[in-house]
Image: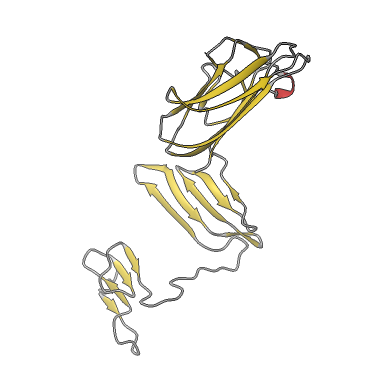
Amino acid sequence: MSTLNLENIKHPDSASNNISVDSSGRVGIGTASPSETLSVSAGADGVVARFTGASASRGLLIKSENALQASNLNTIDSRSSGSEGILGFSTDGTERMRIDASGRVTMPYQPAFYAYNLADTATQNNGQARWQTSSLNTGNHYNTSTGVFTAPVTGMYKFSVAVMTERTTSQIQTEIVGKINGTSVVSRYNAKGDSVNNHNTVYLDYVKKLNANDTFTVQIVSGGVNWQNDYNHSNIQGVFLG
């Protein structure tokens, strides 16, 4: 087997070396002092690299993985899919975000939840509300047993709450309070001041930056509320905005 001892490659029309290899095996393209295994420097404004191919799946796929566990894989995938281009981002071997050819961004693991109750639930004055059935709970960060949402990561979150009481002829005031880590931060109320036999509904929308492991809960403040849950009139929902 022959060995090619290579330190620099230079085009005859170039004033400096085009490709350099240092004593540690690091390769520099456009730089004589590569700091990484592969260092590329354009030296001026413009395209640094272009990746093309003749097949339907062409472009650039960058992978990084843990040498001890091949499944611990992170990728940036900018290959085309047929005639359309995509840009996908994966961590731990699973795609977390994708931008399709139309610019639509999908993040299937973004924390979000929607919860309600299947039956009318009596909530006493100053009681913490619990919605015990969820049709959406990505990541299971809303606890249907306790009514507590726990933020998985630091960022902006949006919560929406609706409470509808049973029909009554009484004059009542229904108030709901949103709490962060047990401290009241926002409240909404609606007063029913007539004797007509109808519902009373109150809505709360709230956007807040939470730290990881902060909690969000809802307190019902009234003389006693009996939720009307047909068609999910009373519900809570939340989503991580980023």
> Which residue is pictured at 42% across the width and 29% down the height?
214
Can you say which quadrant of the picture contains the N terminus?
Answer: bottom left
Residue 183's place in the image compared with 106, above or below, is above
Residue 100's place in the image compared with 170, above or below, is below
Q: Position of residue 36 (x, y in %)?
A: 30, 62
> Which residue is pictured at 53% across the width and 42% down the height?
241
> Which residue is pictured at 53% across the width and 13% down the height?
127
Asked whether, in this view, residue 68 is left or right of residue 164, the answer is left
Relative depth, front residue between 157 and 4: 157
Q: Position of residue 30 (x, y in %)?
A: 34, 75
> Which residue is pictured at 45% across the width and 71% down the height?
49
Specify whether residue 135 is in view.
no
Specify whether residue 130 is in view.
yes
Relative depth, front residue between 81 and 101: 101
Q: Position of residue 45 (x, y in %)?
A: 42, 76
**Residue lying furthest bottom in this view?**
13
Asked whether, in this view, residue 185 is left or right of residue 135, the answer is left
**Residue lying furthest right in this view?**
196
Quadrant of the rendered structure where residue 173 is? top right
**Which color mode does the image show?**
secondary structure
Asked whether, in this view, residue 28 is left or right of residue 223, the answer is left
